[in-house]
Image (cartoon, rainbow, N blue to C red):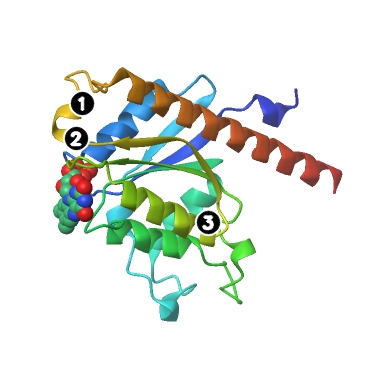
Amino acid sequence: MTEIEQQPITLLALAGSLREASYNRRLVRLAAELAPEGVNVVDYTDLRTVEPFDEDVEGTGATPGADAFRAAVRAADGVLIVTPEYNGSIPGALKNALDWASRADSEPRNDLQSSPMYGKPVAVASVSTGQFGAVWARDELLKSLRTQGARAVVEPSVTVPNAATAFQDDGSLANAELQQKLVELVTALGSTARAVRDALARIAAEA
Ligand SMILES: Cc1cc2nc3c(=O)[nH]c(=O)nc-3n(C[C@H](O)[C@H](O)[C@H](O)COP(=O)(O)O)c2cc1C
């Protein structure tokens, strides 16, 4: 094994909700706890600092929150997004941050392949207080991520309904089968992220 291959995988975790007691952030914490050995799930807590997307200020240095977010995505081996559903879609703050991450560092900014999100292994889970577990938000988010050229890991589907009763006091999910799916999703994302990272390292070494 090369030195790179021995290094742990870093998954940047985004909770689509900004509120303190967010159920979605609870699922992020659970994913971090249950992640397999060699996979570190890092909770990104600065989504609220990402400025509203505006083409006029791209690359000017006037958006430190967006710049930090873009750098965090670029540095991560993969991205795990856990989102609520707002009015049948994904929260604006999350969409805003992802729009920033879909842009290139320099002109032409719409060169998707030069963006932090392009080719990035991503997976989506969702939590809602309703009975459908934010499935629309999950679908919309996956559509947007595919449009950005991210490498979506879609199985198994982890959608947590009835959030108010879904979590136990210790932070685990009352539904053991659903919790097992969460472990499988994080494991699958970790494996894809590892495969992509190692392939890129090999290509770089051969160049
Ligand atoms: C503006 C807004 C819109 C919402 N729309 C939906 C919705 O379309 N579908 C749904 O299942 N829940 C909806 N909810 C309820 C959320 O599932 C619930 O507030 C959930 O707890 C949000 O996630 P969080 O706990 O991580 O903050 C909405 C909540 C808000 C605040």
Q: Quadrant of residue 194?
A: top right
Mark 1 residue type: Phe
Please name the residue shown 39% across and 76% down the image.
54
Tell me if the residue at label 2 has its CB under 8 Å from ligand 1.
yes
Of residues 177 and 59, the one drawn nearer to the viewer in this rendering = 177
Residue contact at pointers 1 and 3, CB within 8 angstroms: no
Residue contact at pointers 2 and 1, CB within 8 angstroms: yes
Q: Label 3: which residue?
A: 146
Of residues 132 and 114, the one drawn nearer to the viewer in this rendering = 132
Mark 3 residue type: Arg
Please name the residue shown 45% across and 59% down the image.
144
Indicate the position of residue 200 as horizontal and vertical percent values: 72, 44
Task: Report whether 164 appears left or right of 69.
Answer: left
Mark 2 residue type: Ala
> Could one spot residue 65 in this view of the protein?
no
Tell me if the residue at label 1 has its CB under 8 Å from ligand 1.
no
- Above or below, 18 against 97 in this view is above
Indicate the position of residue 35 as horizontal and vertical percent values: 44, 24
Q: Label 2: which residue?
A: 163
Please name the residue shown 78% across and 39% down the image.
202
Q: Label 1: which residue?
A: 167
